[in-house]
Amino acid sequence: MKIQGKVHKYGDHVDTDVIIPARYLNTSDPKELAAHCMEDIDKDFVKNVKPGDILVAGVNFGCGSSREHAPIAIKASGIACVIAENFARIFYRNSLNIGLPILECPAASKAIRDGDEVEVDFDTGVIRNLATGESYQAEPFPPFIQNIIQKGGLLASLK
Amino acid sequence: MAMTMTQKILAAHAGLPSVSAGQLIEANLDLVMGNDVTSPVAIHEMEEKGFHKVFDNEHIALVMDHFTPNKDIKSAENCKKVRTFAKDYGIRNFFDVGQMGIEHALLPERGLVISGDVVIGADSHTCTYGALGAFSTGVGSTDMAAGMISGKAWFKVPSAIQVVVTGKPQKYVTGKDVILHLIGKIGVDGARYRSLEFTGDGLQSLSMDDRFCIANMAIECGAKNGIFPVDEKTLAYMKGRTSREPVIYEADADAPYDEVVTIDLNTLKPTVAFPHLPENTHTIDEIERIDIDQVVIGSCTNGRIEDMRAAASVLKGRKVADGVRCIVIPATQTVYLQCIEEGLTKAFIEAGAIVSTPTCGPCLGGHMGILASGERAVSTTNRNFVGRMGDPTSEVYLASPYVAAASAVTGHISSPAELD
């Protein structure tokens, strides 16, 4: 499975409070959450993001609270994949559990720029930067994780 | 093969003679916890996917603590959803307004977590119970749902950092200063995916409330869990709270550790984490004058009785500075009542502070003390991220109850020693 989209780039330690501020946690409706995604660090994200886009960040993405509302907001905003140097562990688990593909790839995280057009192959873990022609290798998902993503989440995959 | 304390608990709950770092295991759970923010998502997931049974109605705890007493209609609907679920499924440990307290103070107090347990909770500060010598870690709502259905969770066995604590803390140095110091030293991702295993003769001088505070903030350096050995203080704390028998695990003498970090309690000073990361730590003596608008004393980190006593010892007979709002939130009904019985509530109110019913409230910018643009708070909570307590331009400085209370009196970030 391959996806292609425009990159929204952020820095290190992007925490779940800025991904979705707690003042919006009185709902778990994906659309409502998506309307406020990233707003405390990037007011224009919601305006600019298009379905299929890709979010790229530095180290420890998703640190902080265990709120599953964070990956839900990102997924519902239209983001098709998050690439980071590495992720905070609860966010990592939550993302895969709800079927949001996320890849750890330090080389891609460093080289890819805001606005680049990028292609990701989930079967091979190859990330291609169409803007520069460079490729980066991430660890591909094992079959059981691919199954969770394809089925749309952990509980759906249990049925 | 030699194992860490965490690895021994996980091996026992996975039915394996031993485990090693990196291994994927499935472990039996002693408790699955959720709150009014995370449980509705888990319940929705469960029911939408057609699951209509829980593994056990006694080993699930649902605590309505974040946006309670409900701050708005949506929060009220969320609590209603969980209340209905608890009733329909016969969940024994459902804590609504009146019984509820902040989850990570309440569950140990009720004896629902004991040494040797494996606990998951849909709240990142679930790592608090490591103070009791349990393995406990934060997860999301889907993992909580899977845990409620199956009584199991999968884990990647963590490696560990050993934290050797020596010496004795000086006056006004608390568990909060120990953990802020550690986070400042190793960084907010210094223990990412790993355990923090505390050891050393310095632990003797740390009370249970200190240990809860330290384990609570293990997540703030990315740790999967933070865990303390079980000693006489742990056993004394659990006595009378549970009918279950605690199981004591100890790390092997030759257990493998990725790194060893040492903390000499003698040398620690009251410590403050500046915005916008808990690793931005400064000791109190190196801080220039920083004026503040609000002080919050409470939370799952510092809302226990010793925290209340520390704050009251500073505020008693003094006044909160003009222009400063001081909000005190005992973490549970028991702590609240103790504050009244010990005269702490009187001291707070006479000083010009307010005392709130238990709630997570302002810690996560929920309610009961939201900051306006550009405002600054000293808070005994656990996170100072952008927008954590309100407007994205507001600032949170993390500190101990002593420092928070002293700052309330002076109107700027201060050491209680300045008032002596």
Image: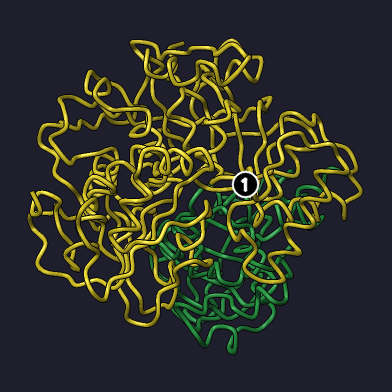
Q: Nearer the viewer, residue B318 or B230?
A: B318
The picture places residue B267, in percent across and down from the top left corner, at 10, 36
Front position in the image: B276 or B74 = B74
SS category of the residue bearing label 1: loop
Say which residue appears at 50% left-offset and 15% top-offset: B239
The chain shown in yellow is which?
A: B
Image vertical order of residue B116 relative to residue B277, above or below: above
Give the green chain's letter.
A
Count of numbered marks? 1
Q: Is residue B416 left or right of residue B323?
A: left
Residue position for label 1 = B122
Q: Position of residue B311 (x, y in %)?
A: 28, 48
Q: What residue sits 87% from the left and 55% below the top? A: B48
Q: Is residue B139 above or below residue A128?
A: above
What is the quadrant of residue B70 in the picture?
Answer: bottom right
Host chain of mark 1: B
Q: Position of residue B408 (x, y in %)?
A: 24, 62
Amino acid on which the number 1 mark rests in the picture = Ala
Instruction: Pick the residue in front: A50 or B110.
Output: B110
Q: Position of residue B203 (x, y in %)?
A: 27, 23
For the point 34% across and 10% down, the residue is B253
- For residue B27, above or below residue B192: above
Q: Is residue B308 left or right of residue B44?
A: left
Is residue B47 rendered to the left or right of residue A129? right
